[in-house]
Amino acid sequence: MIAPMQVIELQDRDEKAWDQYVYGSPNAAIYHLAGWRHVMMDTFGLRPHFLLARTGDQITGILPLLHVRSTLSGN
């Protein structure tokens, strides 16, 4: 039986596995690395939501998102 897929928000303890997934993805860019989550929070005050899909202990997908509020573009 295949383990069910879980989608969870990235935790600090999962950053190394996240980055390993990014390094193994041919279309990934440095902006997909987990460290950018901290840059966006600490430098720009943005609210990141870095989601990862996991089947068992294996990361099977990632989705880095940013919540941006702006007077120009709205919420």
Image (cartoon, rainbow, N blue to C red):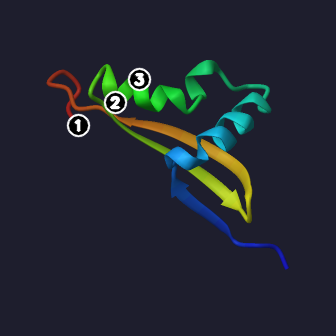
Residue located 70% across and 72% down the image: 4
Amino acid type indicated by mark 1: Asn
Give left or right: position of 74 versus 57.
left
Q: Earlier in the sequence, mark 1 or mark 3?
A: 3
Q: What element carries label 3?
A: helix
- Where is mark 1, residue-wise? 75
Which corner quadrant of the image does residue 29 belong to? top right
Residue found at the far front of this picture: 13
20 or 2: nearer the eye?
20
Question: Which is more foreground, mark 1 or mark 2?
Answer: 2
Question: Do tag 3 and tag 2 residues touch (Cβ < 8 Å)?
Answer: yes
Q: How crowded is mark 3: few (under 14 residues within 10 Å), some or many (20 or more)?
A: few
Amino acid type indicated by mark 2: Met
Question: How far apart in space, not on screen, are marks 1 and 3 (Cα)?
Answer: 20 Å
Residue located 32% across and 25% down the image: 42
Q: How crowded is mark 2: few (under 14 residues within 10 Å), some or many (20 or more)?
A: few
Give left or right: position of 31 versus 24.
left
Q: What element carries label 1?
A: loop
- Where is mark 2, residue-wise? 41
Above or below, 58 against 29 in this view is below
Which corner quadrant of the image does residue 16 belong to? top right
Amino acid type indicated by mark 3: Val
Question: Do tag 1 and tag 2 residues touch (Cβ < 8 Å)?
Answer: no
Above or below, 63 against 58 in this view is above
Give left or right: position of 4 versus 48.
right
Above or below, 6 against 48 in this view is below
Checking the image for residue 39, the label placed there is: 3
